Image (spheres, rainbow, N blue to C red):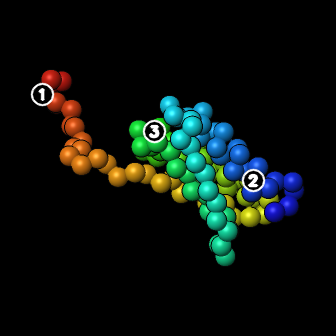
Amino acid sequence: MESGITVEKIKEWLVYTASLMVANPSKVEVNHKNDERGILFTLKVDPSDAGKILGKVGAHVKALRELLHMLGMNAQARISLQVDVPERPAGYERREPDREKYV
């Protein structure tokens, strides 16, 4: 990577940014892997914080990916982000709102 941007600096920035978004910042973990397609960062958070990282319709994670993409352009590297989302607990069912209340 050129221009003074290092993988470690990007990793620190990602940990810092994700820690500000979640309720359990001590559980934020970032790993990276280099391959032929570029650098892949993997972000792990507490299961209760997954929704805060993803955001509504994926808006938060999309913004993080855009910022990483811009950092990669500046450093002449392809940077990707993967968020490890834990499985939903057994017996979890999405609750639909009671629409009859609003009619």
Secondary structure at numbered mark 1: helix
Q: Quadrant of the N terminus?
A: bottom right
Disc number lying in front (3 or 1): 3
Residue at the spot of label 3? 49
Task: Identify which residue is drawn at 80% across, 59% down.
Answer: 75
Q: Residues within 10 Å of mark 2 (few under 14, many from 20)?
A: few
Q: Earlier in the sequence, mark 1 or mark 2?
A: 2
Q: Report how far apart the C-alphas of labels 3 and 1 lie in the structure.
A: 31 Å
Residue that badge 1 annotates = 100
Locate residue 48, reporting x and y percent.
41, 38
Q: Amino acid at mark 1?
A: Glu
The single residue placed furthest to the left in the displayed view is 100
| 38 and 42: which is toward the camera | 42
Q: Nearer the viewer, residue 100 or 45?
A: 45
Residue 74 visible in the shown view: no
Pointer 3 or 1: first along the chain? 3
Horizontal and vertical percent position of residue 99: 16, 30
**Label drawn at residue 8:** 2
Q: CA distance from mark 1 to mark 2?
A: 53 Å
- Write the residue at 71% across / 46% down: 12
Residue at the spot x=74%, y=57% of the render? 7
Establish if 24 lies above or below 28: above
